[in-house]
Image (cartoon, helix red, strand yellow):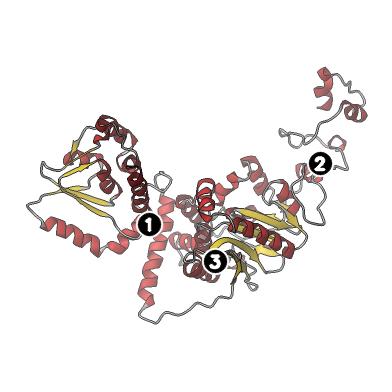
Amino acid sequence: IPEEIARYVDLSRALLDCQNAVLVVRVRGSVRGGGLLFPAVADVCVAASDNDTSFGLPEIHRQMVPGVVSAALARKIGKAQCNYYCMTGRPFSASKAVQLGLVSELLSEETPAEWQTLLRRLQTSAEQAVFMKKREVCSLGSDGEMTEPEQMGTVMGEFFANQDATEHSGSGAAFALPIDCLQLHELSLGGGDGGSVAVLTMCDQAARNTFSAKMNAQLEMVVQKVLSRLDSYRALVLTSSVQHVFHCGANPHEMRRWCSDTSLSRTELAHRMKSLYSAFLQLFSLEIPVVAVLHGKVYGGGCPLALWADYRVGTNELDLHYGNITRGMSPAAQLSELWGHYLPQSRVLEFYYENAHWDGQRCLQEGLVSSLHSTREEAVEQALRLASFVGRQAPQGVQRTRRQVRAKLRSQIIDCEAWAIACSISEKAVFTKIKSQNESFTGLSSAVRTAKLPAAPVSTTTKQPEVAASAKQPWEEDCGVVCMQLAIPARACSSQEVEANFAEAPCSSKCLQRAVG
């Protein structure tokens, strides 16, 4: 039985993950125990209306528990009802199954034409039904939340775009898309299993590695035709060959063209926006660890590409810039959630409102990169060493760990983000200040925080404890309090240091806090 349960787990997962077909179940007679898996995972389930059709979980009366099947059943009828029938083992009729939502409709066995009519309808509209299933139309999202109207607005944009593509595809011969925005190389690990490390280099010199339909189409082809079809890739290094640029996010000139095109609805704009980076989301959803080499500009939409990577190395010239506030843009590619995996909300808002540029040392201090290097070549070498080390380990263990630890792609957030950007574009509120879009707020709080950062290294750097190095002490500023925040100092402050800096500060602890304040 334990071995059968293990295979049953695999079957359950395969049925739950099935996205390319509509699962139709027809029930006649008694359905018990693990058999409830099939109506539970069905997209459409019909049952015979006679008295012989019934359902139940009798395991508890046989010194067993309905374990695996309960995971699928609870998705269909809800946790409370599933709990009741699992604990009592009470059978229920077909009509009760309809009330619970387990069965969609009861069909009379005396009129078999009804079943044939239902099948015909499903076959006729199979393409649309599969689209609805993939895009979570009329269903709970993958995270169990209800779908949002804004999310469905973006989904409908994708639906109409697919229809247009089908109508205009004709019967022309398929052609190979030229690859000039990307380069894919392979580094053999030298083991007997044929494992290798893929190196994917963004090289769109003309557009300076900004989002474009051209790069997205090429990356989609690389992901679907190469990376996702070969089990030999154990890790991937993502880098850029454009000088001083990793990725700059949205192309401002393209965004302004969209603003001036009054024929584009928000539905179309949302789909267009998402289509600029959908292939990158496909890349990061593969079962391949990604090591990103960050050098030069990582601006706007380049931030989520960096944060989706499993591991990041950087160079001293790294310039991380959120930049949305001066561009009128909002997060994309699930960046609104990704920030929270790396930084507290206060730091994210500080980074956003100040339109700050974080150099390599600041990114190292914030934990956004694991090491700094003098040149891109040194950083790539470090990334390859790590990727090779990971690639030589058991791939099954690596993949299962990633599934448990990494952030999950959430289509609801991604679609709602695209819709928000579409609204800004339709209002002609994006990239209105191109000449000053990189300007940052400079104030006392920024000056003090920047002064506390250690000097930039000249060679490979790893994380070190923060060391205060302020040339001008905070109390020497000739202005009032600008901002206050709770701080945890990186080192202790001795009584001698307090006495040396505060003329009337006794070293007794009773007065120390007031004196320092």
Query: Compared to 480, does 214 lie above or below?
Result: below
Residue at the disc numbered 2 = 467
Residue at the disc numbered 3 = 194
* Percent x, y of residue 376: 72, 64
Marks counted in the figure total 3
State how far apart marks 2 and 1 are (Cα). Answer: 51 Å
Is residue 310 toward the left or the right of residue 413 in the image? Answer: right
Pick out the residue farthest to the front: 192
Give the amino acid at mark 2: Val
In front: label 3 or label 1: 3
* Percent x, y of residue 175: 45, 80
Give the amino acid at mark 1: Lys
Give the amino acid at mark 3: Gly
What number is the disc on residue 22?
none
Residue at the disc numbered 1 = 134
Of residues 342 and 137, the one drawn nearer to the viewer in this rendering: 342
Residue 269 visible from this viewpoint: yes
Q: Quadrant of the C terminus?
A: top right
